Image (cartoon, rainbow, N blue to C red):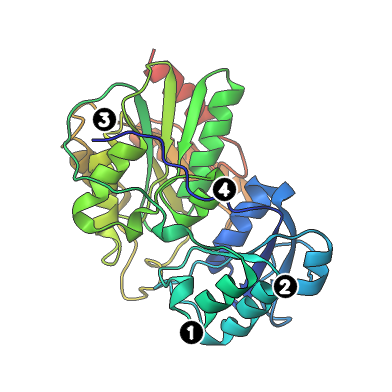
């Protein structure tokens, strides 16, 4: 499999983060990823209504954002199905008319919106379809390769795998280790500047895409591969399985949200049993790395108070014999220590 460098066109900052009229805070994860991990790249947010979710930065019009130097309108939303609402077209076109590039992480391509490609050519701007930017890919081989790899997996989708992966990269680097974040989702690609949005790859090439993304590497470097979906989610399990095979992980970090009542978007589908979820992920990962281990838990505890969070994390740690932490609330030091000690 080729490992030749692939350099997609740069998404030029600063960004104006467009949130449309969404009222589901989880769907604002594109914009939130920029605000948390690359805040220097955002000049403001653009919301269509007062009820629209905010990511906590200044509201700006397209005209005001351009006056402040904004170069790209970033669609800050990742919704179920990945389709751009038709009534957002006017905002996208107005940004293009003001000379702004447009970047989107949706499945629907920007040039599939009536008149957008022609308008972009007329004004000399670039359309970035983040989900569809990757080199030609091959099928996976499962051949053993050097390097150390961590894969974040989950009980469900949209519960912190990207955040946990980026926090682990930062934590390992702060502890004096070489670490690279390998982005596999549109938000991660926007933050990292490169990567492959795995859920837009033809199914036969998913594991090969991850092999390309995290090739053989030096033994003193950690690759933290961003996980996607869940083996237990009827809509996204196929992507999760391909990631497990292609990542060839040495360690898994299990991500979960305390108190989540059901699988995202599926009220008829209860959350999976944790022990069953762990074993299913380890079993799938053993196909390409028989020595894979569970290294710990990254748990979103935002729905409970701190005392309850600490109690639940300690219970998980005791039950499974690995550290459990909330990367936002308590940091990732317990996971970093376990990874480094386990690999010694």
SS label for mark 3: loop
Q: Which mark is residue 292?
A: 3
Mark 4–mark 2 Cα distance, whole angstroms, equals 25 Å
| Location of residue 323 (image quadrant) | top left
Mark 3–mark 1 Cα distance, whole angstroms, equals 48 Å
Q: Is residue 138 left or right of residue 147?
A: left
Q: Earlier in the sequence, mark 4 or mark 1?
A: 1
Mark 2–mark 1 Cα distance, whole angstroms, equals 18 Å
Within 10 Å of disc 4 (Cα), the crowding (few <14, some 14-19, many 20+) is many
Please say if 319 is above or below 12. above
SS label for mark 4: helix
Percent x, y of residue 265: 40, 73
Q: Residue at x 42, y 55 (%)?
A: 133
Which one is nearer the viewer's eye here, 2 or 64? 2
Disc 2 marks which residue? 98
SS label for mark 2: loop
The quadrant of the rendering that contains the N terminus is top left
Disc 1 marks which residue? 114
Q: Which mark is residue 305?
A: none
Disc 4 marks which residue? 191
């Amino acid at each position: 499999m080729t490992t030749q460098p692939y350099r997609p066109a740069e998404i030029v900052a600063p960004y104006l983060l467009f949130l449309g009229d969404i009222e589901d805070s989880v769907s604002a994860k594109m914009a939130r990823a920029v605000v948390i991990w690359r805040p220097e790249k955002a000049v403001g947010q653009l919301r269509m209504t007062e009820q629209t979710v905010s990511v906590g930065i200044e509201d700006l019009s397209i005209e005001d954002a351009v006056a402040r130097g904004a170069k790209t309108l970033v669609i800050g939303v990742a919704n179920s199905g990945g389709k751009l609402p038709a009534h957002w077209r006017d905002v996208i076109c107005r940004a293009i008319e003001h000379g702004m590039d447009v970047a989107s992480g949706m499945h629907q391509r920007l040039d599939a919106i009536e008149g957008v490609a022609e308008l972009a050519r007329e004004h000399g701007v670039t359309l970035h379809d983040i989900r569809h930017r990757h080199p030609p890919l091959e099928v996976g081989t499962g051949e053993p390769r050097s390097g150390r790899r961590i894969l974040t997996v989950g009980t469900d989708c949209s519960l912190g795998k990207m955040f946990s992966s980026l926090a682990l990269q930062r934590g390992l680097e702060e502890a004096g280790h070489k670490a690279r974040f390998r982005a596999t989702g549109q938000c991660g690609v926007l933050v990292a500047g490169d990567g492959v949005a795995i859920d837009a790859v033809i199914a036969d090439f998913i594991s090969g895409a991850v092999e390309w993304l995290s090739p053989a590497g030096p033994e003193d470097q950690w690759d933290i591969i961003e996980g996607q979906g869940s083996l237990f989610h009827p809509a996204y399990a196929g992507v999760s399985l391909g990631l497990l095979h292609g990542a060839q992980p040495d360690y898994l970090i299990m991500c979960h949200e305390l108190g989540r009542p059901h699988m995202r978007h599926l009220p008829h589908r209860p959350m999976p049993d944790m022990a069953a979820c762990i074993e299913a992920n380890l079993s799938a990962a053993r196909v390409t790395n028989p020595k894979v281990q569970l290294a710990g838990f990254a748990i979103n505890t935002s729905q409970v108070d701190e005392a309850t969070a600490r109690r639940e994390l300690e219970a998980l740690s005791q039950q499974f014999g690995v550290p459990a932490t909330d990367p936002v609330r308590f940091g990732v030091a317990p996971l970093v220590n376990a990874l480094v000690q386990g690999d010694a």
